[in-house]
Image: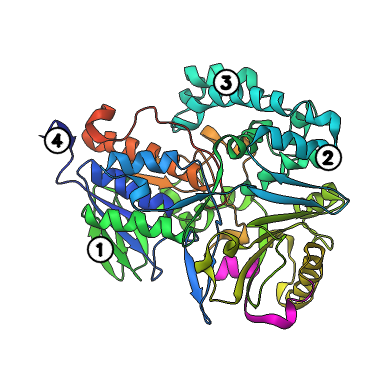
Amino acid sequence: MLQSRDGMRTLSGRRVIIVGAGPGGLATALLLARAGIHVTIFEKDPAVGGRTKTVEAPGGYRFDIGPTFFLYPQILADIFASCGERLEDHIKLERLDPQYHLVFEGGGEIRATNDMDRLEAEVARIAPDDARNVRRFFADNRVKLKFFKPVLEQAFHTLRSMASPGMLAALPHLHPGRSVDGDLKRYFADPRVRLAFAFQTKYLGMSPFRCPSLFTILSFLEYEHGVYHPVGGCGAVSEAMAGLARRMGVDIRLRQGVDRVTFTGKRATGVVAGGEHLAADAVVINGDFAKVIQDLVPETHRPRWRDAKVAKARLSCSTFMMYLGIEGSVPPALGHHTILLAEDYARNIAEITDGTLPMQPSLYVQHAGFTDGGMAPPGHTSLYVLVPVPNLKAGIDWPATRESYRRLVLERLKLLGLGDIEERIRYERIVDPTQWRDDFFVHEGATFNLAHDLMQMLYFRPHNRFGPGLYLVGGGTHPGSGLPVIYEGARITARLLTEELAGARIPSIATGIPATPPLAASGEAS
């Protein structure tokens, strides 16, 4: 029943269960609690955050498990503000400059910065003619973003949403036959420069040679709004959200997984957890879509996403991870974020897409201690190493390949000046695609969820409103993967759910959930 209190409308008495305390589940919980709904979160792990958590390893080394940086914090700041809080009172974000260091194996480097004069100078060092087009690229993507904001903010749970005013306005800018790399050719002739504005498609687990041209906005958003390090690691963001949620009355039950969603007729009416049935007015699922939907929801309640369709879904790539605790320091030139781009990057990406394990891979290294001294004990260094590799559909025998690939990655790290680290490793953890599947419950080890091609976006992606009383949030639903995008999806899901429980559209002033919120960006997560 709707009640009025201090001019704000609430839904007191209504109960919602959220499965999973990842970033999407936590953001949704905050927004629903703000609307007066009683929220219970079930999380199978002993800590919140899903893959957006920071763990402490033996020896005092700290590592982010998944996402290692934060983009476009305005969305999360808006969510905190709707709860009467300031984000900066809960989380300290350090803006990075340079944002990252790009090292091209074929020669050349770019220290990426959002200072346009310096960025032009960096580009001019390797491609003087391309430097003249940097500002035009930003100007054009500023326009593109303006037209796609309403598209990424709206729900796509009905077919008619594909003909919304925002969608129709954006269509001339969609260019469905053009890839990110193809779009960038209009500005930059040098493939290395194009990579500087295209490698961000890895946040979606996709190739810049296949990813829709819409996603040139990813690099634009990085340069326009900055790249941030949350002090203490990205897990600090999840912990801050959980702390606020608890203060708002959200019941977070750790180490408690859900066995299945229950239904009365076609409507989701609760869950079974630990053999006990708990009733709810609605259920929100926050998890790896292709895995969790098959585990928790019978096929009869997902007619558009039966097992056969899930099996045929196009998935992102996976990653081979190394979390290394190193005694001593690393070269001063190794900044917070460093990316080694393979000499034949196109071949590298094609191999991953086609299911071949690359023997000359690109890789990413996070040296969080460059900015945050709390990520390793004194005199030591924590290194996070990520190598994009095929997902498990490729059939690679990882138990047999794991050790040789480890040696290959350590050899590749020498190109970044890390030639002597193996003998100084004091802690090591490897996560290959099989661990993503078995330990982190990621379908086929596809770290970035469903691929973001045009036929798996918008209406064609699993809907935020998945069925009566059943909702999704996270990288597997609209708008897609990446932390700020997931937070945007939480706003969509919370708004739809609140409207369903109220039986009518609710003005944004009544719930604190913006009806047309500011846009999301991307960042690695799911």
Report the disc number at residue 170.
3
Q: Tell me if mark 4 has few (under 14), some (14-19) or many (20+) residues whose alpha carbon lies within 10 angstroms of its own.
A: some
Report the disc number at residue 186.
none
Q: Quadrant of residue 257?
A: bottom left
Q: Give the position of the N terminus as an image quadrant.
A: top left
Residue tagged 4: 2
State the CA–CA distance, disc 1 to disc 2: 64 Å
Residue type pointed to by label 2: Arg
Q: Is residue 6 magenta?
A: no
Q: Residue at x 75, y 67 (%)?
A: 396
Q: Earlier in the sequence, mark 1 or mark 2?
A: 2
State the CA–CA distance, disc 2 to disc 4: 62 Å
Q: Quadrant of residue 434?
A: bottom right
Residue type pointed to by label 3: Ala
Residue type pointed to by label 1: His
Q: SS class of the residue under badge 3?
A: helix
State the CA–CA distance, disc 4 to disc 1: 26 Å
Q: Residue at x 30, y 58 (%)?
A: 243
State the CA–CA distance, disc 4 to disc 3: 36 Å
State the CA–CA distance, disc 2 to disc 3: 35 Å
Residue 166 coordinates in the image, percent (x, y): 49, 20
Q: Quadrant of residue 489?
A: top left
Stretch in magenta: 419-438
Residue 245 coordinates in the image, percent (x, y): 28, 54
Q: Earlier in the sequence, mark 4 or mark 1?
A: 4
Q: Earlier in the sequence, mark 2 or mark 3?
A: 2
Report the disc number at residue 277.
1
State the CA–CA distance, disc 3 to disc 1: 45 Å
Report the disc number at residue 125.
2
